[in-house]
Amino acid sequence: MADTCLSFENLTLGYNSHPAVHHLNGSVRKGSLMAVVGANGSGKSTLLKGIVGVLKPMSGRISITPGTRIAYLPQQSEIDRSFPARVVDLVALGLWPKRGLLGRISAEDRRRLSEALMAVGLGGFEGRPIDTLSGGQMQRALFARVLLQDADLILLDEPFNAIDAKTVRDLLEVVRRWHGEGRTVMVVAHDLEMVRENFPDSLLLARRAVAWGPTSTALHPQQLLAARRFDEAWHEDAPWCGDEHEHKHEHKHPHAHDHAQHSHNHA
Amino acid sequence: MYDLIFAPFIEFGFMQRALAGSLLLSISACPVGVFLMLRRMSLTGDAVAHGILPGAAVGYLLFGLDLVPMTIGGLIAGLVVALGAGAVSRLTLQKEDASLAAFYLISLALGVLVVSLRGSSVDLMHVLFGTVLALDNAALTLIGSIAIITLVGLTIFWRGLVAECLDPLFLRSVSRLGTPVHFVFLALTVLNLVAGFQALGTLLSVGLMMLPAAAARFWVNRVETMCLLAVLFGAVSCVIGLLVSYHAALPSGPSIILAAGAIYLTSVLVGTRGLVRTRLATRRHRTA
């Protein structure tokens, strides 16, 4: 499909043979602004890791439209705050997709960098050492880095945690700007009010996709109730899920009835 | 003054060689030390240095006290230890400190075993502690080549190294270079330790790598300046160490490392980010 950014085909992601995302099907429309919602342990971060490619699928497939540039802001970044770097050094990492290991940073790049800092409200912070930034300032800097990455598909994992209201407003403004520019944005979020106000589409996860579609229907109280019944724990004695052969004949699949949105397609 | 500082280097060829070799080592090893420190791998150098021993010992066992086979042996052993430990930590859940400890202990035990098969304890002392005053042309060429390889490698991979230190997960999300960069860096570490072992011995060569870097951390807050300052500290240590060794008839390796140690301790105390300045920091502060 021409306007699909990425699609999941019977996707299972997980750790140690336990699924964290179970038999996910569906596709994300190009240019959509989508919230990924669900309880802790429901597979939201795992899904993003799978899309970026830092976690390989246990089965099934993630298809990303060729040529899609991805930017990923993880929930727990591995940034070494004690590293002797300035804000500008951290944000300049966002030039990597364009400049790589050896490409020269041009005057144009520098101009874009300071524009990105201005856009997130960090104008004048260029020379600040990163170990002096507050949590909110750090998050703004990381958004500036995503801005600089100029990606088609932007994945943000709980970007608004422990961030004050004003910073959230500013950062949401940046997200809306990306949406306006036709970029595809997926944001893991917990604040349902915020999701309802700002995100046209939602995916409600509880290991499987409980609901996926326009936010008003996907986050309908009934769906939320269904998601809440999900059992977060792994069971060592859980039966093995059917093998690949069975997936092709979904009527035989023991979990098939769970997949409310099994063949849900956004387009 | 002349007699004290310049005469030894002007009058004696072996002092000139020692100075050239140790300065080349400083230029090459100190920036590597800065990155080791920033990646919290300061003890990695030490572990790898221990790991080099069996390779050097096998070279010695087969060919006697000859630089080339001992260097090649040390290089192979060091690479096996560093890359093996790196591979275990990248491919399994074990962290690098544990895998490195395992690899270097195996290697060290092998090394002591090999040395004991033939060598006397004097030979072991030579491998362990080296002597910068006996650098011949072959050794100088080796150190020079390794210095060039290191500087070229650091220049090419600089951005990747910084990214891999600063935000490894980000680098993984935009590029596949993270793991190669890590292994290139480990290889450079091994190369520099091997370059140092003829001059300073396997155990002390890591001193010229780490002490100036650790000292520089107390003065500056940029990677670039930290590398330059570390090189400067390293070079000064070499000059002071060689002079002390010459005038007081002390072994050269430990003298150089102790000079670097003195710079380190001074930096801990009086560096701009050191103990005294941060404790006595003015209570005056700005309004914003």
Image (cartoon, coloured by chain):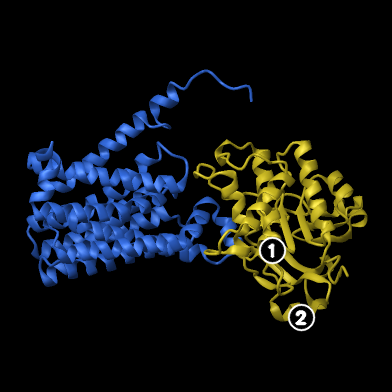
Chain colours: A yellow, B blue
Q: What quarter of the picture does the N terminus of chain B occupy? A: top left
Residue A16, can we see it? no
Query: To which quarter of the image does residue B190 belong?
Result: bottom left
Q: Position of residue B74 (x, y in %)?
A: 24, 65
Tell me if I can see residue A227 in this picture: yes
Image quadrant of residue A129? top right
Disc 1 marks a residue whose amino acid type is Ile
Relative to residue A65, is residue B232 drawn left or right? left
Q: Which numbered disc, 2 or 1, marks the residue closer to the eye?
A: 1
Chain letter of mark 1 equals A
Point out residue B187 in the picture as x, y percentages from the top left corner: 36, 63
Position of residue B283 measured from the top left corner of the image (x, y, whole percent): 51, 18
Label ID, residue A70: 1
- Is there CB contact under 8 Å for labels 2 and 1? no
Q: Quadrant of residue B256?
A: top left
* Residue at the (78%, 37%) spot, across then down: A166
Is residue B168 depicted above or below A60 in this figure? above
Work out whether A243 lies above or below A91: below
Label 2 resides on the chain identified as A
Percent coordinates x, y for residue B222 in the rendering: 47, 44
Residue at image coords 44%, 49%: B224
Q: How many numbered circles does the render carry?
A: 2
Separation (CA) of disc 2 from disc 1: 30 Å
Q: Which label number is shown at residue A248?
A: 2
State which tag comes first along the sequence, 2 or 1: 1
**Residue A210 to residue A141: above or below:** below
Query: Callout 2: 10 Å neighbours few (<14), some, many (20+)?
Result: few
